[in-house]
Amino acid sequence: MAAMVDAEARGESFWTPAFSDRVRVRIRRLLDSGDIGPGDSMFYQARAMILDQEGTDFLYGHDLGGADDFDEALRHGPHEFLPTLVEALVVEYRKWESRNFPGSDLPRTASFIEKVNEVFEQERVAWRLIDGEMVEMRSQELHESVVEPAMRLLH
């Protein structure tokens, strides 16, 4: 990690828009940790929401049902589809937390968003989860000075 930081200080970039298997596993493990939320129980609802929006019968495999279909899409689905999956998880976190902790400020949802962004930062994935929306970073400076404030204003 130190070598990468030194190389970045010299101007080399390691940022990628792709979601490696390692990134996918780390996001999946966030869902299993008890301190953030319900884990697998939200996959079924997130899947149903995406199926309705996308007008399709399955996310990853026609022979898979419910939560398994979502889980496999998260682990192995097309790169382009991962932002949709993560956004659907945030929507479901918000619903789950609002039902189970009425009147709360949604700390588990905020924790999930923060931890996903930590994974992206550590793995040099050029995406950010901002207020539940996945935003691809074209430039760190542009992102911090323009995109992130604009996204916050829109919400």
Image: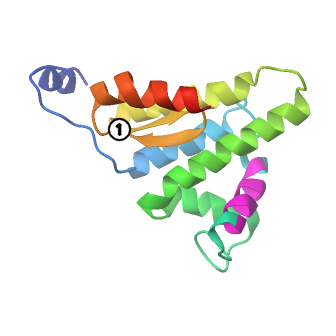
Q: Position of residue 40 (x, y in %)?
A: 73, 49
Q: Is residue 6 visible?
A: yes
Instruction: Name the main secondary structure of what is drawn in magenta.
Output: helix
Q: On the image, which quarter does residue 28 sit in?
A: top right
Residue located farthest toward the bottom when viewing the structure as drawn: 63
Q: Residue visible at 74% across and 44% down?
A: 92
Instruction: Say how the picture is coloured.
Output: rainbow
Q: Is residue 67 visible?
A: no
Q: Position of residue 139 (x, y in %)?
A: 27, 34
Residue located farthest toward the left when viewing the structure as drawn: 10
Position of the N terminus, as image quadrant, is top left
Give the left or right position of residue 52, taking residue 101 as reference.
left
Is 11 rendered above or below residue 19?
Answer: above
Q: Nearer the viewer, residue 103 or 41?
A: 103
Is 155 rendered above or below residue 61?
Answer: above
Give the left or right position of residue 154, taking residue 43 as reference.
left
Q: Residue visible at 21% across and 22% down?
A: 5
Q: Residue visible at 59% across and 32% down?
A: 131
Give the left or right position of residue 5, taking residue 24 as reference.
left
Is 39 rendered above or below residue 60?
Answer: above
Q: On the image, which quarter does residue 67 sit in?
A: bottom right
Segment tinted magenta in the rendering: 42-52
Q: On the image, which quarter does residue 56 sit in?
A: bottom right
Q: Position of residue 130 (x, y in %)?
A: 53, 32
Provide the residue designation for mark 1: 137
Position of the C terminus, as image quadrant, is top right
Is 58 rendered above or below residue 137?
Answer: below
> Is residue 144 one of those drawn in magenta?
no
Q: Position of residue 154 (x, y in %)?
A: 57, 32
Give the left or right position of residue 141, taking residue 12 as reference.
right
Amino acid of disc 1 = Met
Mark 1 Cα-neighbour bin, 10 Å: few <14, some 14–19, many ≥20? some
